[in-house]
Structures are given as C-alpha cells and as structure tokens.
Image: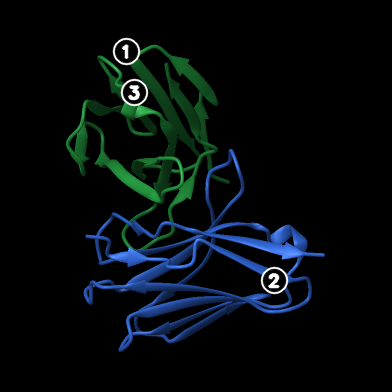
Chain colours: A green, B blue
C-alpha cells in the first residue's frame, strides 16, 4: 500500500533562516505531488505541484520554492523565512487527474 | 476570488442525528468534487468524492449530493458519531491536477 511521509512534524525557525521540508511517497510510481499551506483559521492553499521529476508548477508568488529531485521525493524550501510563512504545511500525492489526493501528517512551522 | 466556499465555519449536532455540511462553488468548469476530514495536527483524510456526471454518491454513513444547477455540494453523515468531530473540507477539481479547497467547517458531535 502507498504511504506518504513528511518531516519534521514541528519546526520553530527564526525570521531570515532557511527552510527545508521533505516529503516522500512509497508504494507508487510517478505520482503527482503537491505542497499546501493551511494558515491559522483558513483553508488549504495549493503552493506547488509536480507531475514528474524536475517539473514544478507554482500556484502563488512567494519566497518559497519546491524541488523534485527524485520520483517520490518533494522538497519545500526557502532561503529566508518571513513571519508570514508560519503555518501548517501539507504534502500530498495522487495517481493522476481527478483522483483523490492523499495527505501526509503535515509540518507545523512557527517563525519567531 | 474564492471559488469554493464553506459558509458555515462550525456546526454542532447531537449524536445519532444527521450532520449536513454544505459547500458552494462558482466555477462551472469544476467536474470532480471531494470531501476531506481533518483532525488537529494531522493531514486531511479523503472521505468521499463525486463526479459531475452524478448527483449522489454513498459510502456507508457518508453521502455526498451534487446540485450542478445550484453549484452546491453537501455531505450528509448519518448517524453522526462523536468520532466524526473534525474539520471537514470540500474541494473541487476541473480535469486538472489541482484541487481548490474550501475554508472548512468544524463539526462537533455532542454525546
């Protein structure tokens, strides 16, 4: 069966520091991969999605970036974090279009 | 512009009764709709989906209804159980890979 792993579960970072969140999927090949953010009291906002290695689409302009160095690995990064980057970050995968997306347990990011 | 809206941020229901969660959308190109359930500090869990060619899909205690003319989606949970207490998100897709999520409704099932 397929599983998705995200780490770390929680992270506290100072303003201006770099960020790297990692997500890996097991049990499937060539999944679509997604990064979402849920800000406090708000819904899920799609940040990035990828349909293959090295293919990244960005949904919102920001100081975050994403990379997919391997088929089942998706990384969310920032060179300098802002206070507004605080939130709950979720990675998800799906097998294709019009298919349910399955989420990891998320990373709670707090910026001080 | 919020294309998927959940206008009720919270809903309280007595155990054993029906919970009805509502969702409205504005984009008539959406053709696939999903409901997710989310507990605190966890990722959303897929519950049930419906294609735009249907108006109803049922899975155990969960039924999703789609009214395309009204651009309205609802999730019925019968009977409601305390373990159903969570935030419920509706989401929509338009033959693409991205989902657009609503802002969520906190369901509380009272024992």
The residue to which callout 3 is attached is A83
Which of B97 and A63 lies nearest the eye of the viewer? A63
Chain of the residue under the numbered disc 1 shown in the image: A
Residue, x 17% and y 36% (percent of image)?
Answer: A61
Nearer mark to the viewer, of 1 and 2: 2
Residue, x 35% and y 42% (percent of image)?
Answer: A33
Q: Mark 2 Cα within 10 Å, few/some/many (few <14, many 20+)?
A: some
Residue, x 32% and y 81% (percent of image)?
Answer: B71
Looking at this view, name the residue that lies furthest to the right. B111
The residue to which callout 2 is attached is B13
Provide the secondary structure element on which disc 1 rests: loop
Provide the secondary structure element on which disc 2 rests: strand
Q: Mark 3 Cα within 10 Å, few/some/many (few <14, many 20+)?
A: few
Distance from Cα at disc 1 to Cα at disc 2 = 44 Å
How many marks can you see? 3
The residue to which callout 1 is attached is A18
Chain of the residue under the numbered disc 3 shown in the image: A
Residue A53 image position (x, y, % from top left) = 25, 33
Q: Is residue B8 above or below residue A37?
A: below
Residue A63 image position (x, y, % from top left) = 21, 26
Residue B59 image position (x, y, % from top left) = 61, 75
Q: Are marks 1 and 3 on the same chain?
A: yes
Q: Are marks 1 and 2 on the same chain?
A: no
Which of B50 and A53 lies nearest the eye of the viewer? B50
Residue, x 55% and y 38% (percent of image)?
Answer: A105
Nearer mark to the viewer, of 1 and 3: 3
Q: Are marks 2 and 3 on the same chain?
A: no
Provide the secondary structure element on which disc 3 rests: helix
Residue A36 image position (x, y, % from top left) = 37, 41
Distance from Cα at disc 2 to Cα at disc 3 = 37 Å
Give the mark nearest the N terminus, 1 or 3: 1
Quadrant position of the C terminus of chain A in the picture: top left
């Amino acid at each position: 069966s397929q599983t998705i792993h995200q780490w770390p579960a929680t992270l506290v970072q100072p303003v201006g520091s770099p960020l790297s969140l990692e997500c890996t999927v097991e049990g499937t090949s060539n999944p679509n991969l997604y990064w979402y953010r849920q800000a406090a009291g708000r819904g899920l906002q799609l940040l990035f999605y990828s349909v293959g290695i090295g293919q990244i689409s960005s949904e919102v302009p920001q100081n975050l970036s994403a990379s997919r160095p391997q088929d089942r690995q998706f990384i969310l990064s920032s060179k300098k974090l802002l206070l507004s980057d605080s939130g709950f970050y979720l990675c998800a995968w799906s097998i294709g279009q019009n298919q349910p997306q399955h989420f990891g347990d998320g990373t709670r990011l707090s910026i001080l | 512009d919020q294309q998927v809206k959940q206008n009720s941020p919270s809903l309280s229901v007595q155990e054993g009764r029906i919970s009805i969660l509502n969702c409205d959308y504005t984009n008539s190109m959406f053709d696939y709709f999903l409901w997710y359930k989310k507990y605190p500090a966890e990722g959303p869990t897929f519950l049930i989906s419906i294609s735009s060619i249907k108006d109803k899909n049922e899975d155990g205690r969960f039924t999703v209804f789609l009214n395309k003319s009204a651009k309205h989606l609802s999730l019925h949970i019968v009977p409601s159980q305390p373990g159903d207490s969570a935030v419920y998100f509706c989401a929509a897709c338009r033959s693409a890979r991205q989902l657009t999520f609503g802002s969520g409704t906190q369901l509380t099932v009272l024992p």
